[in-house]
Amino acid sequence: MKNRDFIITSLQPWDIEIGSTIKNTALEISKTNRVLYINTPMDYSTRFRGNKNAAWKHRMDVVKKRVSPIRQINERMWVADCPFCVFPVGGLPTACLFDTVNRINNKMIADYICKVASRFGFTDYIHLIDTDIYRSQYLKEYIKPALSIYYCRDFVIGQPYWKKNGARLEAMLAAKLDIVLTNSTQFAIRFKKYNLNTFPIETGVNLELYDARKKWEVPEDLKHIPSPIIGYVGSVIALRLDCNLLMDVAQSRSQYNFVFIGPEDETFSNHPLHRLPNVYFLGKKRVETLPAYITGCDVCINPQIINDITDGNYPLKVDEYLAMGKPIVATSTHTMRDIFAEYAYLPANTEEYLQALDAALKECGDKNKEEQRIRFAHTHSWQHSVQKIYNIIEQFQAF
């Protein structure tokens, strides 16, 4: 697909510091099409009580008109920061009040989108909504795109903030749009109830960054940890990871060293895992250094706890592990069984985890299996992922 205009509204701000499916998707689309990425606006509670990080400071500069709200990312792509704040809706007591205020927010965002789209001459544009259940709820009727797509790539309605209104509004949003995309077959089954034009697609991996053929220097804080190293790279949060399983496994395999690379939540920060001599928490690292950390691991793990949020979620980190050629042990979720079963050990309990780790370590140095993993990861490039989106759009518009 070439020379189309895309407008993207996302739950995820452009300035997020970790790897991002929607950012990589947007960048891939912009190779042959024009893209306008609308940075979700701050609400007033975030303005006054939010994390005063660099992204917050930039948004405040935009709101106070100190800097331009438009940033050009490449020849065909722009990010537009909303030069205003919206009203917080999460704590509103009734659905009626929520819908009223949320519609006001949507109208402000829509007016701004139309203004920027007109400035750049965007016409007949495709609107891609990335898991933005609230602030994109009414945009189809306000901005009138040529085609509207909802992209669900996480079970956000299982999280506390979304439980009150999320399920209701996500179903409404999916039903009114033209196409629904999901990043797992489990999610697709759920959305088929609301929209028959629902299609599962697999996300991509940044193969320019996660390149096993480059020479990566193992970072200093990993060098001193003896092998075998069982590594996890990503956010270390109890909502997604099974801390009790990890405790049992680490105690049962005291000869293995377990290393966690990523920011911890409060549960993990205070967990007894920190007192085990064979467990290391190295903290948050820059994205561009993560392949080096993966290189220093013997086996990579994704020890998810099974819940509505994790079972159908697409684990991008597994593609990153595979792209680096590493043996993988990951909890047997629906998506892992559906997509990665041939390339990872998929235990379902502590005993199976122990056996899987033992078996995976025996594969270290097996160049044939390493190449098989890398080749499979390369079938999940962002080019392949976005081409599936193009194919679905073209198929829909053909009828």
Image (spheres, rainbow, N blue to C red):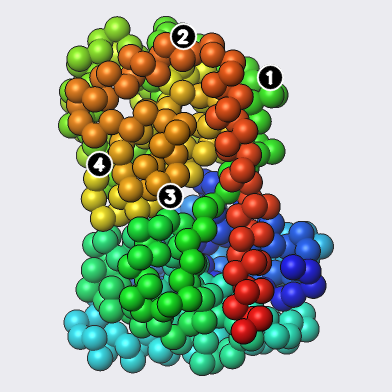
Say what amino acid the circle numbered 4 marks: Ile
Q: Residue at x 73, y 85 (%)?
A: 123
The 10 Å Cα crowd at callout 2, few under 14, some 14 to 19, many 20 or more, is few
Give the image location of residue 56, x and y in percent: 50, 60
Q: Viewer-nearest of labels 1 and 4? A: 4
State which tag comes first along the sequence, 4 or 3.
4
Asked if marks 2 and 4 touch (Cβ < 8 Å), the reply is no
Helix, strand or loop at mark 3: loop
| Type of amino acid at the residue the image marks with label 2 | His
Of the residues under marks 3 and 1, which one precedes in the sequence?
Answer: 1
Q: Secondary structure at mark 2?
A: loop
Which badge, 2 or 4, comes first in the chain's sequence? 2
- The answer to whether residue 89 of the structure is visible from this angle is no
Q: Earlier in the sequence, mark 1 or mark 2?
A: 1
Q: Tell me the residue that label 3 is attached to.
A: 314
Check if mark 2's residue and mark 3's residue have beta carbons within 8 Å. Answer: no
Q: Is residue 302 left or right of residue 197?
A: left
Amino acid type for the residue under numbered disc 1: Lys
Q: For the residue labelled by badge 4, is the local secondary structure a helix, a strand or a loop?
A: loop
Vertical side of 186 occupied by 109: above or below: below
Marks 3 & 1, CB-CB < 8 Å contact? no
* Among the two numbered marks 1 and 4 on one chain, the one whose residue lies closer to the N terminus: 1
> Label 4, on which residue?
305
Mark 2 to mark 3: distance in Å? 33 Å
Tag shown at residue 224: 2
